[in-house]
Image: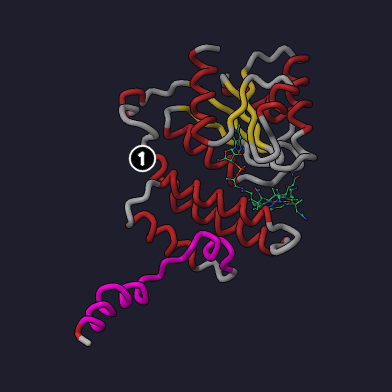
Amino acid sequence: MINALGTFVVFILPTYLHMDYSILDSLLDVKKQRIEAFCEERLNAGRKAYEITEEMAEGLREIGRGYKEIYFDAELMVSGWNAKKLLQLLKQPLLQEELKEGVKEQRDKIGKIVIGTVKGDVHDIGKEIVGIMLSAEGFEVIDLGTEVEKSKYAEAVAETEADIVAMSALLTTTREYMAEVIQYFREEGLEVKIMVGGGAVSEDYADEIGADAYGKDAVDAVKKAKELILIG
Ligand code: B12
């Protein structure tokens, strides 16, 4: 009896008191209240902010996989809202966190990057994670937001003398616009490196349209951006 009571107090009671929301519960919470508790719970458990964004991205992909079968437009919208809220909460921890040891010494800006989601596409969660990680790693990031037209990318490059243009696309229909932007830049003789990424883009597609680099996630984006600056 005492043993049973002990087990209850030590193992079962804490799980009742502890609200451990899963990423899916938190992303799909229509009342938009769980995401903050989720974030706090993960940070208090010692998880790195970047790991939390990866968990979020996997949750969003899971919702994407179930799109039109289990999840519909309403779920896409709610998950998008909650993800943006989570990113807002993680922005400061992300900026302070180093991807690897010893980055502190290279705090001087190592290059300028103009980033934006292409024309016709409003998905900006991945683009924001990439932008934050690039800033955290010493790049000056000029974020043009979403639905960016080629002339806007070009104007921003001219104004800021950026080294790299980074484009994001999540729709198979909008990724084609990346090819148009690249062609425009080449025709206008604008000398800037072009990096692409986003759920609708692959390494093969990046090669096909003549991009200088492709990044599969934010860590890869930072690595490729550094290579473009250092190696060319
Ligand atoms: C949330 C969401 C939405 C939200 C977006 C909210 C927001 N503020 O972003 C809303 C509700 C607005 C939305 C709308 C639509 N969506 Co949507 N959406 C999603 C969902 C579930 C998650 C997207 C996301 O944020 N993923 C997580 C992030 C972190 O991943 P990511 O963007 O790929 O970014 C990572 C990498 O790719 C990389 N990366 C990203 N950008 C860049 C840039 C560079 C330069 C580099 C190097 C790397 C890089 O780093 C990131 C971090 O690892 C996806 C499912 C999925 N598989 O992604 C569908 C999905 C993208 N949507 C889809 C669709 C169809 C739509 C709509 C057409 C639906 C409709 N009926 O209207 C509209 C289109 C609106 C428009 N014109 O853009 C489809 C696209 C299918 C396709 N291949 O074309 C998907 C795949 C769902 C599905 N399975 O069908 N959506």
Q: Classify 10 Å Cα crowding around label 1: few (below 14), some (14-19), many (20 and above).
A: few
| Drawn side of residue 222 relative to residue 211, left or right | left
| Drawn side of residue 185 relative to residue 130, left or right | right
In-front residue for pair 199/70: 70
User: Residue 199 location in percent, x, y?
Assistant: 66, 40
Q: What element carries label 1?
A: helix
| Drawn side of residue 194 relative to residue 26, left or right | right
Residue beneath the point at 73% across and 61% down: 73
In-front residue for pair 144/208: 208
Amino acid under disc 1: Gln
Residue span colored magenta: 3-29
Locate the C terminus by quadrant: top right
User: Residue 140 location in percent, x, y?
Assistant: 48, 28
Q: Quadrant of residue 172?
A: top right
| Drawn side of residue 23 relative to residue 62, left or right | left
Type of secondary structure dominating the magenta stretch:
helix
- The residue at the far left in this view is 2
Query: Which residue is the site of mark 1?
Result: 96
Whether 8 is among the magenta residues is yes
Residue beneath the point at 72% across and 12% down: 189
